[in-house]
Amino acid sequence: MPILLLVIFCLLLGLDSTPLWDQDEAAYAGFAHQMVATGDWRMPAFAWSEVHRKPPLHFWLIAAASELLGERLLTVRLPGALSVLGCGALIARWGAGVFGATVSRRAGLMLLTSLAMVVGKIGLTDGPLLLAQTAAALALLNHLKTPQLRWCLALWGASAAALLIKGPPVLILIGGMGGLLLLLHPDRKRLLLPLLGMPLAAIPLVAWGWWAWGADGGESIRWMLDFYILDRASGGTALGQTGPPGFYLLTMLLLLFPWGWRLPGALLGMASARGPEAMILASWMAAGWWFYELIPSKLPAYALGAYPAIVLAMAQFEGPRWANRLGGGLTALIGAGLSAGLIGLAVTAGAATIAVPGIVLAVLGVVAWRRPPIRAVLAPITLALIWLAALPALRPELFLTADVAAVAIETGHPVVIAENYRLPSLPYYLSAAGVDWRMEDGVPPEGETLITTDLTEPPVDAVALDGLIPDKGRPVRFWVVPP
């Protein structure tokens, strides 16, 4: 219980104070804002956010949270935070019927005390999708173990939610798992009802698509089908982001820190085991992880659906001693690299507070080498200190637009944003503050504040704010010119 309380505290820390990350988080916040402001919840729409459009369930959750708690940073991130906590609880509870209570509780705790919990600190679709995919996978496996209609309903309901969050990933996961188990599992007949009923899960998505088609004549839906399905199926990549096979293995070793030391041994132990649990987990990993290693498009979140299977394997299977030593060495290198990177960044940025999480991680890591129970606090405390000490010191580099918007809001006038900057956080901050704004090239009329990055002869009352373009890493100077 103390560890769980620490996890919850560290997860919630900074959710209501850290400015939005561009691009996705700000776009999702903008989608939800627009839904609440206009009352039109059909199609996600916001300035400079077209490329971030997805099915709307995650944005509906943010909008609903805003209606209940008021529009604030917390409501953008709360669905993700609760989803990560729910995923750990789901592994412990629903996993017990398939893998046993001890293994499942250990696996749920591993997930919640790893760096993967960072998914719950950022308001992206990844947290809710992880919860929905985990629920669908565990419902399928529970039905395979003990056939009951409630597991079929849970599978179809969770899959329906996942489809309304991000579309195809849950079909890849459940279709891949189910197909492999139909070929390999001795009780394969038990899978027929849940898998044959999977088309039911598409009903809410199809209903939303029919409802939303009228928002723009189907333009956005056709774009989503092309960008998320047809382009990827033909070998395209997500905004040019790619990587070699093994990309996700390296990502897992990082995100599952400090428990990644068990991964090599767990994989070898699972490969040599003869039992249904090993077969089930291998099918889960094949559909949720190995498939994505083979396609050219690479984003770390793609393989998140396999993380519950990974932690369940690490909680259950023991490999040879040399594999654990190899994993321990890799984990030590990752911890040392994180610590050194934070300390080095503090030196180059000239901000001592950035080094605090790195120093604490190094100290706790040394203690954990002798006292293994300390491992459970490494990731939660490190993430909490990054949010508490490091991110505020890096505000101009990471969250410049939050300060630009604050200066513009203080002028008390409508705002004109010059179209030389096209990330959605700036219009979102203005919209959330109730400021009238528009986008326009050139000099605004009298009585309006100008925000621009292209000003050759600034007036004496212009305010300059220097930093980096979010997500680009290039130096930029913003000018806020009051009327």
Image (spheres, rainbow, N blue to C red):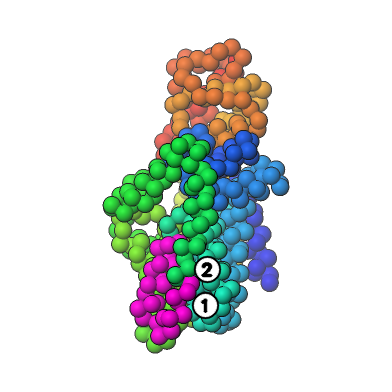
Q: What residue type is labelled 2?
A: Leu
In the rendered image of this protein, does residue 217 appear above or below residue 258? above
Residue shown at the point (59%, 60%) measured from the top left = 83
Residue shown at the point (56%, 69%) measured from the top left = 153
Image quadrant of residue 177? Answer: bottom left
First in residue order: circle 1 vs circle 2: 1
In the rendered image of this protein, does residue 369 appear above or below residue 36? below
| Magenta highlight: main SS | helix
Residue 368 point in image, percent of width and height:
55, 72
**How crowded is the residue under tag 2: few (<14 C-alpha within 10 Å), some, or many (20+)?**
many
Residue of label 1: 143
Residue 386 point in image, percent of width and height:
56, 53
In the rendered image of this protein, does residue 106 appear above or below residue 433? below
Residue 105 point in image, percent of width and height:
59, 76
Residue 155 bears which disc, if any?
2
Q: How far apart are marks 1 and 2 (CA)?
A: 9 Å
Q: Does the stretch in magenta take in 186?
A: yes
Q: Which amino acid does label 1 sit on?
A: His
**Location of the C terminus (image quadrant):** top right
The answer to which of 319 and 28 lies nearer the viewer is 28
Magenta stretch in the rendered image: 170-194
The answer to which of 11 and 387 lies nearer the viewer is 11
In the rendered image of this protein, does residue 463 appear above or below residue 34? above
Residue shown at the point (45%, 54%) measured from the top left = 167
**Location of the N terminus (image quadrant):** bottom right
The answer to which of 150 and 436 lies nearer the viewer is 150
